[in-house]
Image (cartoon, rainbow, N blue to C red):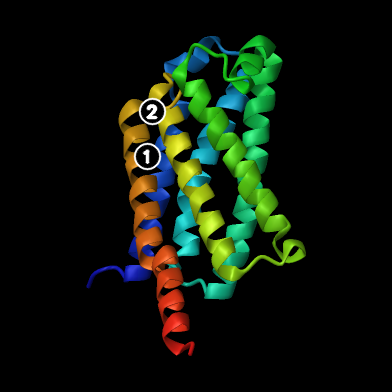
Amino acid sequence: MGLPRKLLVWLALAVAISVPIAAAASSPLLAWRDPVYIAAGFAGVIAMVLLLFQPLLAGGLLPGLSHRRARRVHGWIGGLLVAAVVVHVAGLWITSPPDVIDALLFASPTPFSVWGVIAMWAIFAAALLATLRRRLRLNPIVWRRAHTALAMVIVAGTVAHALLIEGTMETMSKIALSVLVIAVTVKVIVDLRVWARRSRSKRQSSSSSP
């Protein structure tokens, strides 16, 4: 008798997030790094791992979680994602302020810095938009479209940043995680049909109007 589908999904997710973390923890590059730099690097790894959960929660793809609970956890992980990015950038600032300043000013000669900064600002913007959603009284369709657009920028920027940088993450596990994050994000965006719903509602509105 095989394992239940629910258990298989959670086991697959556990492998997907534990392998990159374990590979990064055993990286030989950590041997001569100071603790602050190591903490900053692992904060970046954790941020990318957390990014995998967000589309899974938004699309209701994690078994055992109701829609309401999934939305709540999605918000919590969004907060953790912001915290991980802050720790990542703060740690790099402590170890090398000029490099961080160049990156923030888009003056860094390394392309991965540009993509990292783009992803960082998109994460902050998505978190701010979620925090101010009720106060701004955004139309649900506008909210979905804006949040989805920011999510696309976050995923694209994070994956480009991770793939271009030669850091503590092991190459194959990093590529596998990147492909998985992109695949899940694309699937959820297609399944939710954010823009298609908007178009359909427009057609229904125009057909019902005199």
- Residue labelled with disc 2: 163
Q: Amino acid at mark 2?
A: Leu
Residue closest to the eye, 139 or 161: 139
Q: Position of residue 38 (x, y in %)?
A: 58, 22
Taking the spot 69% from the left edge, 13% from the top edge, the residue there is 97
Q: Is residue 161 visible?
A: yes
Residue 144 figure quarter: bottom right
Q: Position of residue 158 (x, y in %)?
A: 47, 36
Tell me whether circle 2 and circle 1 mark residues in contact (CB < 8 Å). yes
User: Nearer the N terminus, badge 2 or badge 1?
Assistant: 2
Q: Amino acid at mark 1?
A: Ser
Taking the spot 71% from the left edge, 17% from the top edge, the residue there is 94
> What is the secondary structure assignment of the residue under circle 1?
helix
Q: Give the side of residue 48 with respect to residue 34, left or right.
A: left
> What is the secondary structure assignment of the residue under circle 2?
helix
- Residue labelled with disc 1: 178
Taking the spot 37% from the left edge, 56% from the top edge, the residue there is 11
Residue 63: image tag: none
